[in-house]
Amino acid sequence: MLYGYNLAVVNSPAQYIKQFYNQTIVARNGTSQNDEALTLFYSVTVSVFAIGGMIGSLMVGMLVTRFGRKGTLVRITYLVFIAGALMGFSRMFASPEMIITGRFITGLHSGISLSVVPMYLGEIAPKNLRGFLGLVPSIFICLGVFVAQILGLHELLGKEEHWPLFLSLVVIPTTIQLMLLPWFPESPRYLLIEKKNVHATITALKWYRSKVNIQAEIEEMQEEQRSMSSVETVSVIGLLRDRSVRWQVITVVVVNIGMQLSGIDAIWFYTNAIFENAGIPLPEIQYTTVGTGAIEVIAGCIGCFTIERLGRKPLMIGGFTFMGICCAGITLSLLFQVHYISVACVVGIIAGFCIGPAGVPFLMTAELFKQSHRPAAYIVAGCLNWMSNFTVGFVFPFLQMSAGAYCYLVFFGVCMAVAVYVFFIIPETKNKTFVEISQMFAAMNGTLEEESTELGHNLKLTKMNGYGAIDMENGVIEKNK
């Protein structure tokens, strides 16, 4: 939710932030800035969020290995309090640097959480609900955008005197998270496969599956452990060199770059400017923007509640194709001066994105890799995601000035290319275990999955009263013959 909020929060107060920058520079240097210089300063403010996100994504592997999935999410909440204080007091201290630093720190937090949250949810979810839970973050991203759009209305916090408070409200949901999240168990997969903590694994699984037999799920975890050449976490270099996951890595690269270069960030960052260019009267723009936010949430819910029925591929192909058509539609509508069609196309891009491309790439990153490769895969995905986010956020206003209506054709090409790749390359992963998904890619990679027949250091299972029973002397779970 904080990621979505921070994407959209700079949209409404853009003119006030530019005025603040200009006033501060005049007070310091005695000279004002021209429009191009202020656009550059504002572009830095928008895109530094992505730089922080990229750096945060590079830290994911180290953090989740050391602190676990839940532990990492709890620890990084303090970054938001620091960022909120910097942005909230920036006008008091007449410091644009505090806004930029605060945006960077919120980006750092989002970069970490945007990888860790899908990883955590993907590991605690049963396979029949993994798609549903995997798209829950996309709903909250859309909800965060929607909340920022509502609070940005002139009747609420959209006035000049309120923009520092508007930027710093991120501390409220963070406080709620900090009070609740520590009470939740850690990922059972992390506890069993990486920490080899049998007792904690059983406790966590019983908490998450209070009415379900956990026997089969622990056996599936063990199968994954046996199929891995090593239980050690693979580095990014090791991931890129590993031929057995070559097509999985290519897929993560394509869908994550495509997700950002689809044009959605340009829409979110500069919605008001796009609607103004489309000819919508200024007093009506803010309400039109809020309407698009409501559509985002509805579209996200549609994707979330249909993914287990339709599968991953249809949502990705349909979402990217629809976005591409709408990008081409914006170009045509601007060329022929049919302004309200361009507004409909903006809404269509947002709806198409939230139905599938908003969340499925994060879910795919969790599904396509086994435990040993997953943190490194999220580092690669997150880094590419944020690099693309920065590129769009920084370049789009200048691209729009130079190419005009034709700038949206770039996004059209990206969307259609990703849709074609998903259609021909990526297999459907619905209701498949992580091991089964890995075996599906084995033929594409030209490798064979090696299943170890030796239990070695792997744990053994038993079934007693519907659960694994712990051998207290050996510290393992034994299986009834």
Image: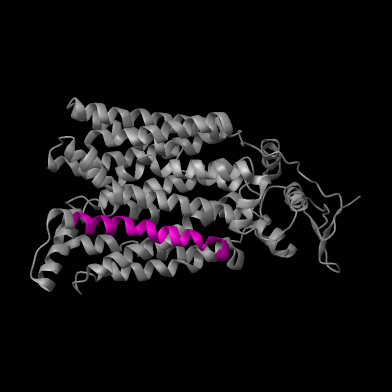
Residue at the image point whose x is 62% and y is 44% from the top = 246
Magenta residue check for 40: yes
Q: x, y percentage for residue 146? A: 32, 47
- Left or right? Give the position of 209 relative to 448: left
Q: x, y percentage for residue 409? A: 32, 32
Query: Which span is picked out in magenta?
Result: 38-63
Q: x, y percentage for residue 357? A: 45, 39
- Left or right? Give the position of 29 relative to 118: left
- Left or right? Give the position of 38 relative to 113: left
Q: Is residue 343 above or below residue 479?
A: above
* Residue placed furthest toward the right: 481
Magenta residue check for 412: no
Q: Is residue 413 above or below residue 377?
A: above
Q: Nearer the viewer, residue 381 or 402?
A: 402
Q: How many marks?
A: 0
- Left or right? Give the position of 236 relative to 278: right
Quarter-of-image position of residue 298: top left
> In the rendered image, is residue 358 in sight?
no
> In the rendered image, is residue 307 in sight?
yes
Instruction: Check the image and tell me how it is coloured.
Output: one colour
What secondary structure predominates along the stretch shown in magenta?
helix
Q: Is residue 224 above or below residue 343?
A: below
Residue at the image point whose x is 18% and y is 35% from the top = 278
Residue at the image point whose x is 24% and y is 46% from the top = 398
Q: x, y percentage for residue 197? A: 72, 65
Q: Nearer the viewer, residue 203 or 243?
A: 243
